[in-house]
Image (cartoon, rainbow, N blue to C red):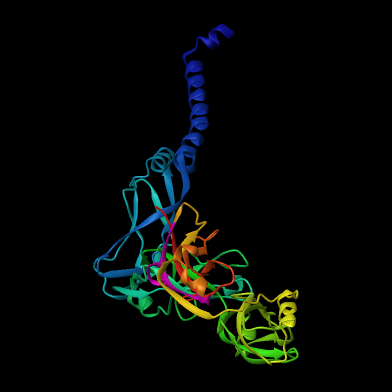
Amino acid sequence: MMDKLIESPWFLRITALTLAMLLFFTVQPKEKDSSDGFSSGTQADVLHNVPVQVYYDDESLIVTGVPKTVDVTIKGPMAIVLQTKAVSDYTVFVDLRKQTIGEHKVTIQHENFSDKLSVQIDPSTIDISIEERVTRTFKIDPEINERLLAEDYFVKSMTANPSTVTVTGAKSAVDSISYVKATVTGEQGLKSSFEQEANVKILDRDMNKLDVQVKPEKIKVNVDIGEYTKEVPVVLNQKGTPGKDITIKSLTPITSKMTLFGSKAALDKMEQLNVDVDVSKIKNSGIFKVSIDKPEGISRLSEDSIKVQAVVEKNESSTNEEAIKDEEQETDQEETSSTIGSKEFKNVPVDVRNLDEDYSSNFITPKNGLVTLTVQGDEKELANLDINDFDLYIEAADKHNGNHKLPIQVDGPRNLTWSLSNNIANLRIERIS
């Protein structure tokens, strides 16, 4: 019975129809999902920091307001999205070649993206300004925080090399330039002159940095640092009482002026340097040395002592024995009874000692490093005196790039005094390239 049913043509037809209908209802939802479900073969991605090209006349115009980069969202078939990210042959741009000077709202455009991709740029529109491009030359104003300087020191001068820069930018920006600065720095307690490379800053009146092009961007600044000084006359004050039968006819300082170093406030108060001379120790005419006490607020003197020429008159009652005792007395004064004369040596060279071998030096003053040396003393000693008996030099140890004012020092025979046409040398020191 069953075999006959299975072999029946109608049974086979009904069975085939049932299977066909089952297959139809099973396959149809999947096909629908495939056609309606666009996301199953689609991908969206964001391209970050895509550069924006700007097309305009960059020789005569300046454009502001265009972002350097934007984010681009692309959406489409996965394979095309991945290929676009890998190849990056697309372009995002703003075309301003037909725009006029002024302010505009423009659309950021794109090209070389596949037609099968949806492209969205963030931001899609921007506000831009087109201005005339101008170029001007400005003088540089070098600066340093003077709180970095050691006490009693100040900035004598600052020079920039080059002294000017060329600034290019939008006319409104260039017109608003108020300051062109080059700031140098250093460690606390600066005492020596130096040279340093510094960045050039272009600022408006409110000290805001301006978006302009500057050439060169870096310059060299030479900072000349000096110590506060003041040259004052030497005034002798007699202290004590001269010995019996002795009259002090005159006291004259061999060094008539002295250079003082110290704070500006203290120096401003100094009109003269008072030097006390104890006349009770003077027995004969001659030249003797007197130590100098530093006044309050003065850090140092150009010399710690001076030589004083005394003219003494003795009464007839003075005995030879007293004169001998006077010559043997112990005192810090170096006395010399003599006939005083002077001798002058011109164009005497000043040596530079202990300068680092990596540096060279040139005299600014005195010219060519030559000075006049005037020697005072016993005429008999002066008669046999030669310039080779003296060494004139400046001490340049630990001095580097820059201008340095240094005292000229003299080594010479004892019992003589001398003076120079220049007591201070202005020396330019540079590194040997």
Residue 296, placed above or below residue 143: below
Q: Nearer the viewer, residue 398 or 351?
A: 351
Which stretch did the figure color magenta? Answer: 360-379
Q: Nearer the viewer, residue 81 or 25?
A: 81
Whether residue 100 appears in this view of the structure is yes
Q: Mainly helix, strand or loop, the magenta region?
A: strand
| Total marks placed | 0
Question: Which quadrant would residue 288 be assigned to in this image?
Answer: bottom right
Question: Which quadrant would residue 293 be assigned to in this image?
Answer: bottom right
Quarter of the image where the N terminus is located:
top right
Residue 216, placed above or below residue 259: above
In the visual, does 353 lie left or right of 168?
right
Residue 195, placed above or below residue 338: above
Is residue 38 rendered magenta in the image?
Answer: no
Is residue 374 rendered magenta in the image?
Answer: yes
Find residue 401 and report its horizontal and vertical position in percent.
Answer: 47, 61
Find residue 423 and report its horizontal and vertical position in percent.
Answer: 50, 74
